[in-house]
Amino acid sequence: MSSLPLPLFPLPTVLFPGQVLPLYVFEERYRALLRRVQASGEPFGVVYIKRSSRDSAAPLHERVSGVGTLAHLMQTEQHEDGTSSILVVGGERFRIAGLSFGEPYLMASAELWPLPRPAQSAAEYTEQCAAALLAGMQRSWPERAAVLRQEAPADPLLLASYAASLLCALSADRAAPACNVALAAPTLLERLELLLAALPATPATDSAALH
């Protein structure tokens, strides 16, 4: 399998394919990364930071996930102080085959790892799991049930990405470890099941993040 050189932007959250993520770029190394992708038009890779620097003395490259998502730059607003507010959308999933350290930021040798569509024999059960995930989301966030019914994609693959993004956002990234496991799931069915298991067991009461 061919690999591609990919600059990495480690984060305490998980980006899923098809989901939009706003980022504030302030560290000089990531300003350099941004300049690179603006000049080349290439994506960069978002990977989850599994352990923070507060919890581990290990170097950053030993604390990031080996699976991530391509981030395609959609919008950039540069501020007077040199920082930038950007908007990215998740592309294909990838696996890290190797790392290099010649740039201010981490560089990966990455292999694209698309999630396979379910076999025809599993399609019906996959649809049932997707429906169960949407129902579970409505139970977990009843005040948002009507919005979920309106916004949630019908396609199970897109619904999984939507659910994971919502989980991370509404849990202040407390669900990020479970979402990272779901990102690395080998099948769509397993991803749906993992996300369903990660939903809050009781209705969430903190609605501040919903608006």
Image: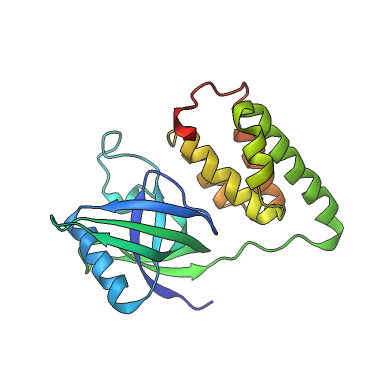
Relative to 113, residue 172 above or below: above
In the picture provided, is 196 more to the left or to the right than 128? left
Left or right of residue 20: residue 53: left
Q: Is residue 93 visible?
A: no
Colour mapping: rainbow
Residue appearing at x 70%, y 40% in the figure: 134
> Is residue 47 left or right of 59 when viewed as pictured?
right
**Numbered disc total:** 0
Residue at 54%, 76% in the rendered image: 1
Figure quadrant of residue 78: bottom left
Name the residue located 49 percent from the left edge and 39 percent from the top edge.
168
What's the residue at 49%, 34% (across, down)? 210
| Residue 124 falls left or right of residue 58 | right
Residue 36 lies, in percent from the top left, at 27, 72
Displayed quadrant of residue 85: bottom left
Coordinates of residue 29 in the picture (x, y in percent)? 20, 59
Where residue 3 sits: x, y (%)?
A: 46, 75
Closest to the observer: 11 or 51? 11
Q: Residue 165 or 186: which is nearer the viewer?
A: 165
Q: Please tell me in which quadrant of the rendered image residue 4 appears.
A: bottom left
Q: Is residue 130 visible?
A: yes
